Amino acid sequence: MPFRFLKYLQPTHYFTLFRKDGSTVYPIPSNLPEEVLQQLAEDTSYLSNTSRQYDLSWQAIVKGYVGDTATYATFEKIPIADEYRFIQKNFHPIWAFYVLLLRLFSLKNPFIEIPAFLKTKNTARASYGKLPIKDPLWHTFESHLVESKPFISVIIPTLNRYAYLKEVLLDFEKQTYSNFEIIVVDQSQPFQKTLYDGYALNIKLIRQEEPALWLARNTAIKNANGTLIALSEDDVRVPKDWIENHIRCLDYFKCAISAGVFFPEGETIPQNRSYFSMASQFATGNAMLYRSVFANVGLFDRQFEGQRMGDGEFGLRCYLEGFKSVSNPFAYCLDVKAPVGGLRQMGSWDAFRTKKWFAPRPIPSVLYLFRKYYGRKRALLALLKTVPPSIVPYQFKRNKPLLLLGSLFSLLLLPLVLFQVWKSWSLASKKLKEGARIDGL
């Protein structure tokens, strides 16, 4: 990562890792197209020129640069004051103080850390995401891939959400692109086969008795006939050009994965997801990718069965193998958030909030992912950042004052929280010992 202090705030972010070929997503500024450089702002307040270049590279990614320019393969050590400046500039001031405390508690030299922190304390916050890199050609782009009409397999696993599934199927009847099949893996009880009658759709129905999400998706992929695989869910609403915009994105950016955007029904798309960018996450509820990607990296890891982050782990494998994934705001979907069925029924809906006092926190699959790919130290940093705020109920997770209160309250519950984390760590150790459960295509 260009700035080492990112490991404290984003310890398990895709982009903190080098790909298997030694590359990163961070472009070397001197190689960027002139029209992109003109939309970046060099920060001359950094002490070193290297820091300034790293900042430009960070800006490019945050502002939505998606290109094939050469990227950094190594990062040099930069002045501590520049590290603090970067954090102050890109994150809330409380996080800069958080980093300072972590470094002091880890016995870093206070005579270096404190002056560097104070020197950068008044750094103005940047707002790069509000001025994304302009890409005016998308709207007039004529996709040869769309014109060639590749066959698409749309995959929808469902569990006890028939009322919501009906609405999704109606959305797919209205698609502007017609050369597709829908593979529904139905795990519902009782099973209603007649529900699928009467739709003007090519539906391939697979009945699965066992309620298992990752098994369902893997089974559907194995039975898919499409050269492109689209992943959807049973409690979303999709616009009529959803399939077409996913295909156009794959063609426009010559990428392997089009990662769509979610936002809750009744709201608008989040500002930081409203433009194209290198995708820093993968969600199986809204994506399209080439079937060959699965052939290369394998299917979904069934160690995540009944738990969370199986899609994130798959996306990380794709990233490490060097597949380009683009966050696509034009292939959005509305998240209905059905109160029944799905993961709410078969397992853990929230990765960090427990249903019972002595349940593991976070759920073991989270630590399985963190420890497998990022190592023990990064996993501990992630726990330190995510567990204390998780004391606050899910509906208040965006309330910053309550999150802070939850972090303080976690100190009162420290023995219980430590037990929960220990239990999760132990169960994750068991998963790591067993190894991945990834089938090939």
Image (spheres, grey):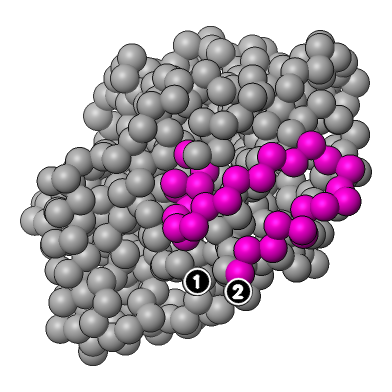
Q: In the rendered image of this protein, does residue 413 appear above or below residue 162? A: below
Q: What kind of element bears circle 1?
A: helix
State which region is magenta: 190-218
Q: In the rendered image of this protein, does residue 356 appear above or below residue 123? A: below
Question: The C terminus is located in which quarter?
Answer: top left
Residue 17: in sight, yes or no?
A: yes
Please state which of residues 27 and 438 is positioned toward the viewer in this rendering. 438
Residue 49: in sight, yes or no?
A: no
Which residue: 22% across, 47% down? 371
**Residue assigned mark 2:** 340
Residue 191 lies within the magenta run: yes
Do the numbered discs 2 and 1 sit on residues whose CB atoms are within 8 Å?
Answer: yes
Please state which of residues 298 and 145 is positioned toward the viewer in this rendering. 298
Which residue: 56% across, 78% down? 395
Would residue 278 appear left or right of 121 to someone viewing this image? right
Question: The N terminus is located in which quarter?
Answer: top left
Which residue: 31% across, 20% down? 20
Q: Which amino acid does the dot numbered 2 rest on? A: Val
Q: What kind of element bears circle 2?
A: loop
Q: How far apart are marks 2 and 1 (CA)?
A: 7 Å
Would residue 296 appear left or right of 116 to someone viewing this image? right
**Residue assigned mark 1:** 345
